[in-house]
Image (cartoon, rainbow, N blue to C red):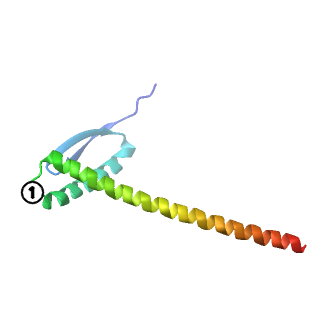
């Protein structure tokens, strides 16, 4: 049985370091996510009255989750509009093909 290879990566959030194991192919994405999270935490810290690290982490998690859910709703809406548009085009194509077949 093969065990996945994992290497520890050091992530820095605000002024704290976290050592997290990840596979080599996950490393880049994890570092990018930590960098984004660090920027967001710093942004929220600048607008708050000296929050603790834990409170700041929760506020950031809520903010990022809210942004994610908003984008997901927008994406789902666009997907539905695309599906509706494709269905309309298919109906028009079917009607045109039937009309052409009836002429022959």
Say few, some or many: other residues with alpha carbon within 10 Å of mark 1 (under 14 / 14 to 19 / 20 or more). Answer: few
Image coordinates for residue 81, horizontal then vertical, percent: 54, 65
Quadrant occupied by the C terminus: bottom right
Q: Position of residue 72 (x, y in %)?
A: 42, 57
Q: Secondary structure at mark 1?
A: loop
Q: How many marks?
A: 1
| Closer to us: 87 or 40 | 87
Residue 16 seen by the camera: no
Q: Which quadrant of the view contains residue 36?
A: bottom left
Answer whether residue 15 is visible to the viewer in this image.
yes
Residue farthest toward the left in the current orientation of the protein: 50
Side (left or right) of 95 relative to 40:
right
**Closest to the observer, 19 or 42:** 42
Q: Residue at x 27, y 55 (%)?
A: 63
What x and y, as percent, mark residue 87?
65, 64
Against 35, residue 26 (above or below) is above
In the foreground, 35 or 68: 68
Instruction: Name the residue at 33% across, 46% down.
Output: 27
Left or right: 94 as drawn, with respect to 62: right
Q: Could you tell me residue 4's position as x and y percent?
A: 40, 33
Residue at screen point 82% across, 72% down: 99
The residue singled out by tag 1 in the image is 49
User: Residue at 69% of width from left, 66% of height from top?
Assistant: 90
């Amino acid at each position: 049985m093969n065990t996945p290879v994992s290497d520890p990566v050091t992530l820095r959030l605000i002024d704290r370091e976290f050592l997290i194991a990840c596979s080599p192919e996950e490393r880049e994405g994890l570092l990018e996510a930590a960098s984004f999270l660090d920027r967001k935490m710093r942004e929220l810290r600048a607008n708050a009255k000296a929050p603790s690290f834990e409170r700041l982490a929760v506020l950031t998690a809520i903010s990022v989750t809210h942004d994610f859910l908003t984008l997901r709703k927008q994406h789902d809406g666009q997907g539905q509009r695309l599906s509706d548009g494709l269905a309309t085009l298919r109906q028009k194509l079917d009607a045109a093909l039937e009309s052409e077949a009836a002429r022959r």
